[in-house]
Image: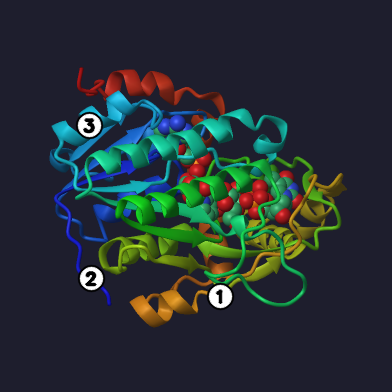
Amino acid sequence: MNVARSFSSLLVTGGCGFIGSAFIRGLFSNLAFDGRVVNLDALTYAGNPESLAGAVDPERYVFVHADIRDADAVRAVIERYAVDGIVNFAAESHVDRSIVAPDAFIETNVVGTFKLLELVRENPSLHFHHVSTDEVYGSLGPTGAFREDTAYAPNSPYAASKAASDHLVRAYARTYGLSVTVSHGSNNYGPYQFPEKLIPLMILNLFESEPLPVYGDGSNVRDWLHVEDHAEAIWAIVRSAPAGETYNIGGNAERTNLQVVRSLIQAVVEETGRPASALESLLRFVTDRPGHDKRYAIDASKLQRELGFSPSREFESGLRQTVSWYARHGAWVERVRSGAYRDWIQTNYRDRTPK
Ligand code: NAD
Ligand code: DAU
């Protein structure tokens, strides 16, 4: 039975990252949220408050520079701003980084989620939505799709840390009767994505005539979901899904990595007028990612059936818009690459963390 949750003060963790910032931009635009948004973010390399510049109503928006592992800081935020719901985006999110240095993934994704759950336990009227990933289900063969009841089989330290956090969320809901929902999104793309992930990395390398490093033979398959579709789906779940439910969110756009890179080459040709042959010559097949999952595919029929949600953005046109966005936002790219936005924070955001 669907519910109709409403919130007056929503705590969004990781709201300066790629998906969290899209969610907050949405709350102040098409998602039409009329309450207060408290964005709590540790501002790691992946968090950039400039992704929200001009997109929020300053009367209804608070930024708090804090770590989700800092229970005292988060508790103070919950009390001071009378928080009645939490949407947890805060995470270390890049698989390659987790292979090189897993520690931060355990710290933020596992310990951080645990600390948040303890605070929800202290405030059991809060609703907690946990943003998870399809990677917890592992890797598929040529057919089939992940369902919500697919067994967990995480293959990277990142996926294992997300799986661990999902298990904690489930256990806290069952043991302590907390109100939680969980979503498993597929690969996101769109504006404001840090240029370490496949699509923005390839776009910038194409613009800069740098090599395009395709792992293995490029036949690994991902399902691509526009970040604004993802934000809309999460909002539908947060507002309407029964407590204790989990939902897969997909983009209906399964592509091999090589198909994605070739579509990007085509989009950059259209954007810049450069010859395709020059861009094709940048393709390089490089050493594969260790433990590289072969294929992800999402069965999102539960979300469609129970909440009436399905994504509306088509992949190839979404890619062209994304290429255009990166072409017009060179300054944003330079600043996230250099970390220069940290100076901007000092002048544009006063630290409002309650003492
Ligand atoms: P991101 O790396 O772009 O952003 C993460 C944000 O969390 C940043 O703003 C960072 O500063 C913040 N953060 C990191 N550690 C923190 C901490 N300890 N305390 C407070 N803030 C902290 O990530 P994203 O791509 O926006 O992903 C958001 C969530 O969605 C993650 O939970 C991720 O697992 C999940 N997800 C991502 C995708 C994808 O394709 N990117 C798909 C499905 C699910
Ligand atoms: O499926 C959801 C997940 O999608 C999210 O949980 C993760 O946070 C997000 O990072 C993403 O994980 P992937 O590992 O699938 O995304 P990434 O962009 O790193 O890689 C996509 C595919 O492209 C993957 O098969 C590896 C490949 N790849 C990636 C990079 C960075 C390359 O071939 N070359 C590259 O340089």
Q: Amino acid at mark 2?
A: Val
- Count all numbered tags in the image, as a single digit: 3
Residue 228 x %, y %: 41, 60
- Residue 141, quarter of the rendered image: bottom right
- Residue 3, quarter of the rendered image: bottom left
- Separation of residues labelled 2 and 3 (CA atoms): 26 Å
Which mark sits nearer the N-terminus, 2 or 3? 2
Residue 319 x %, y %: 57, 61
Q: Is residue 278 left or right of residue 227?
A: right
Badge nearest the viewer, 1 or 2: 2
User: Quick check: can you spot residue 42?
Assistant: yes
Q: Is residue 132 left or right of residue 207?
A: left
Residue highlighted by disc 1: 299
In the rendered view, tell whether residue 264 sits above or below residue 67.
below
- Separation of residues labelled 1 and 3 (CA atoms): 37 Å
Quick check: marks 1 and 3 in contact, CB under 8 Å? no
Of residues 218 and 64, which is closer to you in this image? 64
* Residue 3 image label: 2
Of residues 237 and 265, which is closer to you in this image? 237
Of residues 192 and 239, which is closer to you in this image? 239
Which mark sits nearer the N-terminus, 1 or 2? 2
Q: Amino acid at mark 1?
A: Asp
Label 2 residue SS:
loop
Of residues 225 and 99, which is closer to you in this image? 99
Residue highlighted by disc 3: 77
Dot 3 surroundings within 10 Å: few (below 14), some, or many (20 or more)?
many
